[in-house]
Every structure is written in structure tokens, then in C-alpha cells.
Image (cartoon, grey):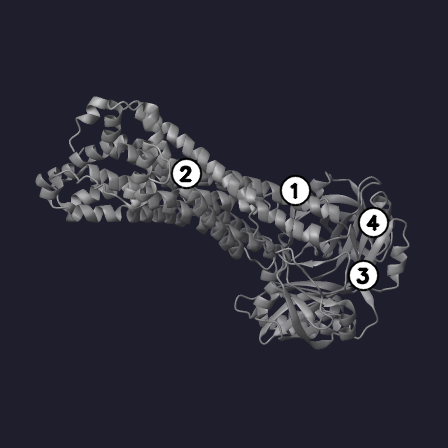
């Protein structure tokens, strides 16, 4: 072992606790990066393999009805590789008299079950036989939620007719990795599922013999998907096409991709914070080490070691700590990544999850940690390179103490000698005080960043369910219905209020930009459905023109006063220009809101509705739901209370895990920074403290001086941490500003208090550790140290 290697081992042992703090902080940063990167990589690899193996389509289109013979014209379009027609239908499933009726989507299986696209993965059982009567395959998530087994029967209501179906298979589909209802925002497998029936069975139930109402296709590798979609839309317009979409806009794929984007964002923000703190700690610890080893450095130069060799020694020390931290971070990241992947397996339904970490992720983890380590020690290494041996042989000049501007306050403010010593020492070392304060403030910021998500999630809950949805239930019709049905519903015993709404699928265009969205027509004023933005402010509908989502305005590059071209995708397929009167920064989706009467005028139709919002007598709601479910024209009956429960069940566990992880990581940052600051202060002032002991100060009084310094730095850091935490929360909200969901920026007062209390506790822990070192300090040895 060389001389420098022996010195390296000795120095690391002497600095073992500070080194452990640095390693722990690096491990937190790398662990967060590995967790997010490995989870994203695993999800992408699993999804890609699933899509290719089970031939997930590239383009989808729903329509009202088209003859089967017309499919050949679509197949002949340039670029179309494989095309498959099918039938889909909304279904209501009854399990028992005590269980609420569930909604489902029925999809036809081709004759012989040999689907060429969106093939099913058979988890158990078999697919319905070609000539079977009333056999069905059920999605695994739905079957698990209802504890269904092979051989169980379902009572299915399809277009008003009741059928008894026997479960012969439990399956998964690449089309429903994220199984969510067409109008839902979160999965609720108790209330919604997917079933597959032989095409002949579904043809008879839906009266679509020799016809289809849904298409899935794949395009060739060199095909222009946009051109295919445009051709399909032109050909299918007369058949009630709702607009063809690419895979990226398919509902399940879009949700999974959005979640991956959020994971990628998390994999950038959190590691950046931790590695910045690690670089700061390295700079603080190694600069102090170099300062105390001036004479050793001079001796090494005198014995022939070049400045580059000595600089390489200190750089090796930082790289060794970075390597150890990265190894620990990889272990932590794998553990967290596997747990996160298992959590996602509850929401994303794949045949199996293959957790893996690509080598490029590991290589990048080592690269960024080594880079942070190099940045952290670079200024200290430059000082080594330029330090002359003769200068280095002399001890570092003592700090010059002189009267500062703060000293003028002592005559007006009653202070103790200990408190003056604390304040003077902090003000005499401004650079170190600023860096220490910044490091502690980052731990406060991380705590706020982890906790604000809970505030924002429940703020989103309040926006969506408390402030906006004032109704108890929502019913939707299979077809738009004359408003006369409203009076029938109002006459049901227990219905307290009822308000109709009209939804119209449209293609919204602005210049070359376009989007498939819905126009929602509401009564104004509405008592049951309020349009509330992320700040909790209610927006009134304009009498003329439209109120549109801010996110849709961003996508289409619109502002108030612009005109939007609307192509209606139903019935007469009207075209008109619509004035953008207002924007609303709503919580989810991309929608256009209009006064219902104005929408009827644009559509040139009599008052009609696609659904009704209901406020119910809570003691009669079960009977009302049963009554509504029996009506053949109703497609869905949605209970708002079930939506609330699904939201909380889905979100609560994710938020709590995130908060726990951030609590652990922020404690590591806080204890690491505070402990390193205290150890450096103790090392620099050991002779001073020993002198005070000789002069009669007790160990407790000296410990109070050190504790007071840490308390002062922590007190200064907490408000700065609040500001940084709010800034990071703001950046996170903007990073997660997706088309599907938008989070409100909500940081409650108790979140700030929680972050402050946790950091103060961490400060107390670090102070206690340093106090033990102070108690074990040997006075004689310290006083013999040469100044």
C-alpha cells in the first residue's frame, strides 16, 4: 500500500461520521434516480413487449354504424397493414340484489376467436367458443374486484335486454392496461370492467347484424398515420364517425404514458437536490480537512509529491465517497423501484412485470454522482495546486476578530456572554453560515415538496367533488334524448333536483392545430354542476361563445377573443365558428363548455340531453338507483360517493408512500448538514472550548454555545426553506401540468409547521451526537495543539 493510500484510509476513518453523512445524502439522490429510472424502464420494456406480442393497434375509430362490406375500402387505404372491425356496446351487470349494478364495455370477438389485433392474454380458462351461447370472458381486474371465478354467471343488460352470461375465461388486453371507464379519471374496478363476447351474440343484442361500430388497425412501418386518419374520417363521416385517433391518444395508453412522464420528472428534481447537498457537504468537509492538513501537504510537496498527485489524493477521497454513496443508492433504488413497480401492478394490468435496470441507468448514476463530487472539491483542490510549501508550513492564520456592526446592538439588547459568542462566530464566518443555512433549508424544502402533494391532492379532491359536483348521481343515456325525459326522472320518488346536460363530440380546429374533444352544454345558472378552477373560483358560462379549458387553449394556441372552428361528429355534422369568451384553468381533461340553449342553436336542434345530474334523498338513493338501472335507455348510473371513495383509495396510498420517503430523505439531509456543520465548528474551536472549560465553564454551558449556533442557523434556514419548498412545489405543479390532470398548488400552514418541526428535531439529534463528542474531549491534548 502506498503512502497516500495509507493516509487516505486514516483520514477517512478520522472523518468516518462526516463521510457517512455524505454517503447517505448521495445514496438518497441516486436511490431516487434509480427508483424512477428503473421503474420507467421496466414499465416501458414490459409495455413494449406486451404491445408487440399481442399486436396492439396503432389507430382506433368508433362510429355509429357501418356495413361490414365497407371494411374492404378501409383495408385498401394506402399504408393500412391489418384492419379489424368489431362491435362495442355499453353493458350493465347485475350481481345480486344487495350489490350495486356495475358498468361494463362489451367487445366482440371475431369468429373463431382468432383476433389479429388487440389479442387477449388468457390468465385462466378459455375464450368463448364460436358456436357457444352466452359465454363470456372477463377482464382480470374486474373479476378480481368481484371475486369472480370460472363458471360464475352474470346478469347483463344490453340495450334494455337481459342476458345470463357464463364466465369461461379471465383475460388481459393490451387495450386496457389502465382499465378505466370512458368518462372516468381513475380506475374503479368494482364499478367498471370489460367483457368479451362472440360477435354473433353481440350482433343480435345490439341489432348490428352485418355491421360494425368500432375499428382497430395497424399501419405499415413507413405509413403516414395522419394521412390514414384523414382518409378514414372522410370515408366514415356518413357513418357517424367520432374521429379516428392514433395510439398516443388511446385512453389507456395515454394514462400510462402520462404516469411515465411524471416518473421521469421526479427522477430529475429530487436527485438534483440531493446531489447539490452532497457537493456542498463534500466542499465543507474536505475544505476543512485541507485547511487542517496544510503542514502535511507542505511536507508531502517537500518529499517530492507533485501538486497533481496531492490533488489526485483528495479527488480520490471524494470519488470514493461518491462511489460508496452510489452503490448504496443503487441498492436503495432497486428496493424502492421494485416496491413502486408492485404498486403500479395494481393499476396497470400486464401479464407480468419484468423489473430491470439498464446498464445505461447505472452508468449515468455513477457519472452524475462523480460529477457532483468533483464539483464539490474543485475549489479546495485548486487551493492545493497553488499553495507554496513554505506558506503551507505555517499554520493557517487565526481569524481576525474586530468590532462588527452588530455589536452596537448589544448595549440595547440584553444578551448573555454565550449568546454573543454564538452570534459573533456566525457573523465572522459568513460564507460557511450561508452554505450551512442553504443546506438545512434544502431539507425543509424537500419536506414541503413531499407533503404539499397531499395538500394538492386533497385540494384537487375538493375542487372536483366538493366545489364542482354538487349532485349525488349522474345518469347518461345511450342516445341523446328529448328533454321531456327530465320530467319523468323528476317524478321518481326521492329525486330532489335534476338538471340535464348535453355533450357533443367535436373536432376543434385552430389554424393547423386540431383536437378531438367534447362540447358540454350546461344550464346557467346551474345548481348541481359548477365550473371551478384550480384556485377554487367558480366561472359562469357565457350567454354566447364558449368557456374552454386553459390546457386546450395552450394546445390550440388560443386566447380570449379568438375563434375556434368546430366540426360536430354526430348526426348532421354541423360546422361553425365559436368565439372563445373565457378560459378556465380546470382540473382535468380538455373540454369546451357552453350555455345549453346556445349549443342547441348551433346544432339546430330541439332541446335534448345526453344525461342528467341528480340530487337525491339519501334514504331513498338505493331504490332510485335500482329504478334507473331498469330503464333501457340509460347507459350509466354513476354514484358520486363511489367516485369520491375510488379517488381517495387510489391516491391515498401513493401520497402516503411519497411523504414517508421524503421524510426519511429530508431527515438524512438535515442531520447530515447540521452534524457536519457542528463537527467542523467543534474542530475549529476545540482549543477555545478547552480554554473555556479551564476558566470554569461547564460542559453543558459549552454545549449550549454549540447548540445555540446550530439553532441560529436552523432558525435562519427554516424561512428560506419555506420559500424554496414553495418554489419547488410550484415547479412540480407545472412539470405535472398534463392534459389528463392538473394539480392545484396548495401548501397548507400545517405543512410549513410540519417541515419546521421535523428539521428542529433533526437539529436536536445532531446536537446530541456532537455533545457526546464534546464530553469526551481531552483538555490537555487539545491545549497542547500548536496555533
**Mark 1 vs mark 4: which is more N-terminal?**
4
Residue on which disc 4 sits? 616
Which quarter of the figure has residue 22? Answer: top left
Numbered tag placed on residue 500 in the rendering: 3
Helix, strand or loop at mark 4:
strand
Hey, which residue is sitting farthest front in the picture?
A: 412
Q: Position of residue 211 (x, y in %)?
A: 77, 65
Which quarter of the figure has residue 656? Answer: top right
Q: Is residue 539 above or below residue 96?
A: below
Residue on which disc 2 sits? 670
Q: Between tags 4 and 2, which lies in front?
A: 2
Q: Are the two marked residues, 1 and 2, in contact with CB atoms closer than 8 angstroms?
A: no
Q: Position of residue 429 (x, y in %)?
A: 28, 43
Nearest the camera: 26 or 95?
Answer: 26
Q: How far apart are labels 1 and 4 at the CA level?
A: 24 Å
**Mark 3 vs mark 1: which is more N-terminal?**
3
Helix, strand or loop at mark 2:
helix
Q: Quadrant of the C terminus?
A: top left
**Mark 3 vs mark 4: which is more N-terminal?**
3
Q: Residue at x 45, y 39 (%)?
A: 665
Q: How far apart are labels 4 and 2 at the CA level?
A: 52 Å
Position of 475 with respect to 731 (left or right) is right
Q: Position of residue 214 (x, y in %)?
A: 71, 63
Q: How far apart are labels 2 and 3 at the CA level?
A: 55 Å
Residue on which disc 1 sits? 649
Q: Are the two marked residues, 1 and 4, in contact with CB atoms closer than 8 angstroms?
A: no
Nearest the camera: 135 or 178?
Answer: 178
Nearest the camera: 693 or 334?
Answer: 693
Circle 4 crowding by C-alpha within 10 Å: few under 14, some 14–19, many from 20: many
Amino acid at each position: 500500500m502506498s503512502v497516500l493510500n495509507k493516509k487516505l484510509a486514516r483520514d477517512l476513518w478520522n472523518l468516518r461520521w462526516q463521510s457517512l453523512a455524505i454517503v447517505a445524502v448521495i445514496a438518497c439522490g441516486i436511490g431516487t434516480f434509480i427508483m424512477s429510472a428503473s421503474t420507467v424502464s421496466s414499465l416501458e420494456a414490459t409495455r413494449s413487449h406486451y404491445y408487440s406480442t399481442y399486436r396492439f393497434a396503432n389507430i382506433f375509430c368508433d362510429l355509429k354504424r357501418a356495413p361490414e362490406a365497407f371494411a374492404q375500402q378501409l383495408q385498401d387505404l394506402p399504408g393500412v397493414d391489418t384492419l379489424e372491425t368489431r362491435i362495442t356496446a355499453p353493458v350493465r351487470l347485475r350481481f345480486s340484489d344487495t350489490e350495486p349494478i356495475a358498468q361494463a364495455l362489451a367487445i366482440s370477438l371475431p369468429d373463431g376467436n382468432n383476433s389479429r389485433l388487440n389479442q387477449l392474454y388468457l390468465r385462466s380458462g378459455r375464450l368463448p367458443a364460436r358456436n357457444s351461447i352466452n359465454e363470456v370472458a372477463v377482464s382480470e381486474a374486474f373479476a378480481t374486484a368481484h371475486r369472480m371465478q370460472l363458471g360464475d354467471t352474470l346478469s347483463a343488460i344490453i340495450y334494455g335486454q337481459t342476458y345470463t352470461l357464463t364466465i369461461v375465461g379471465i383475460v388481459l388486453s393490451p387495450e386496457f392496461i389502465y382499465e378505466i371507464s370512458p368518462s372516468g379519471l381513475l380506475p374503479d374496478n368494482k364499478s367498471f370492467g370489460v367483457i368479451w363476447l362472440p360477435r354473433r351474440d353481440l350482433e343480435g343484442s345490439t341489432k348490428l347484424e352485418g355491421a360494425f361500430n368500432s375499428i382497430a388497425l395497424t399501419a405499415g412501418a413507413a405509413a403516414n398515420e395522419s394521412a390514414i386518419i384523414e382518409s378514414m374520417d372522410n370515408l366514415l363521416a356518413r357513418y357517424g364517425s367520432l374521429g379516428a385517433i392514433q395510439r398516443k391518444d388511446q385512453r389507456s395508453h395515454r394514462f400510462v404514458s402520462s404516469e411515465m412522464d411524471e416518473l421521469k420528472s421526479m427522477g430529475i428534481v429530487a436527485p438534483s437536490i440531493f446531489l447539490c447537498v452532497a457537493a456542498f457537504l463534500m466542499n465543507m468537509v474536505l475544505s476543512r480537512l485541507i485547511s487542517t492538513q496544510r503542514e502535511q501537504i507542505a511536507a508531502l510537496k517537500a518529499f517530492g509529491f507533485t501538486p497533481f498527485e496531492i490533488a489526485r489524493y483528495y479527488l480520490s477521497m471524494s470519488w470514493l465517497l461518491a462511489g460508496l454513496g452510489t452503490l448504496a443508492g443503487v441498492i436503495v433504488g432497486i428496493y424502492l423501484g421494485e416496491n413502486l413497480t408492485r404498486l403500479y401492478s395494481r393499476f396497470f394490468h400486464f401479464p407480468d412485470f419484468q423489473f430491470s435496470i439498464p446498464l445505461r441507468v447505472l452508468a449515468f448514476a455513477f457519472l452524475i454522482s462523480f460529477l457532483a463530487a468533483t464539483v464539490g472539491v474543485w475549489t479546495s483542490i485548486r487551493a492545493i495546486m497553488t499553495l507554496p510549501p513554505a506558506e503551507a508550513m505555517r499554520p493557517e492564520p487565526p481569524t481576525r476578530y474586530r468590532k462588527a456592526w452588530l455589536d452596537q446592538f448589544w448595549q440595547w439588547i440584553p444578551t448573555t456572554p454565550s449568546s454573543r459568542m454564538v452570534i459573533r462566530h456566525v457573523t465572522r464566518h459568513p460564507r460557511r453560515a450561508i452554505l450551512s443555512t442553504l443546506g438545512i433549508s434544502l431539507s425543509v424544502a424537500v419536506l414541503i415538496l413531499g407533503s404539499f402533494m397531499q395538500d394538492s391532492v386533497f385540494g384537487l379532491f375538493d375542487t372536483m367533488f366538493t366545489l364542482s359536483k354538487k349532485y349525488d348521481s349522474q345518469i347518461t343515456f345511450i342516445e341523446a334524448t328529448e328533454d321531456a325525459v327530465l320530467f319523468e326522472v323528476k317524478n321518481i320518488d326521492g329525486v330532489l333536483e335534476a338538471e340535464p346536460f348535453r355533450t357533443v363530440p367535436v373536432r376543434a380546429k385552430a389554424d393547423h392545430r386540431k383536437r378531438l374533444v367534447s362540447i358540454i352544454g350546461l344550464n346557467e345558472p346551474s345548481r348541481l354542476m359548477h365550473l371551478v378552477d384550480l384556485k377554487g373560483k367558480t366561472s359562469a358560462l357565457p350567454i354566447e361563445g364558449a368557456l374552454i379549458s386553459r390546457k386546450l387553449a395552450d394546445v390550440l394556441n388560443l386566447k380570449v377573443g379568438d375563434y375556434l372552428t368546430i366540426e360536430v361528429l354526430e348526426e348532421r355534422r354541423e360546422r361553425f365558428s365559436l368565439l372563445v369568451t373565457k378560459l378556465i384553468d380546470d382540473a382535468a381533461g380538455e373540454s369546451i363548455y357552453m350555455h345549453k340553449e346556445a349549443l342547441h342553436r348551433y346544432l339546430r336542434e330541439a332541446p335534448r340531453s345526453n344525461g342528467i345530474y341528480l340530487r337525491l334523498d339519501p334514504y331513498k338513493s338505493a331504490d332510485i338507483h335500482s329504478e334507473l338501472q331498469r330503464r333501457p335507455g340509460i347507459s350509466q348510473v354513476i354514484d358520486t360517493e363511489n367516485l369520491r371513495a375510488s379517488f381517495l383509495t387510489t391516491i391515498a396510498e401513493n401520497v402516503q408512500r411519497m411523504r414517508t420517503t421524503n421524510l426519511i430523505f429530508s431527515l438524512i439531509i438535515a442531520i447530515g448538514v447540521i452534524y457536519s456543520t457542528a463537527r467542523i465548528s467543534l474542530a475549529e474551536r476545540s482549543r477555545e472550548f478547552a480554554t473555556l472549560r479551564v476558566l470554569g465553564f461547564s460542559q453543558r454551558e459549552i454545549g449550549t454555545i454549540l447548540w445555540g449556533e446550530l439553532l441560529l442557523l436552523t432558525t435562519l434556514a427554516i424561512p428560506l426553506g419555506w420559500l424554496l419548498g414553495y418554489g419547488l412545489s410550484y415547479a412540480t405543479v407545472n412539470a405535472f401540468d398534463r392534459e389528463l390532470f392538473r394539480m392545484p398548488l396548495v401548501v397548507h400552514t400545517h405543512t410549513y409547521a410540519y417541515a419546521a418541526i421535523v428539521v428542529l428535531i433533526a437539529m436536536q439529534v445532531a446536537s446530541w451526537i456532537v455533545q457526546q463528542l464534546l464530553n469526551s474531549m481531552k483538555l490537555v491534548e487539545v491545549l497542547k495543539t500548536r496555533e
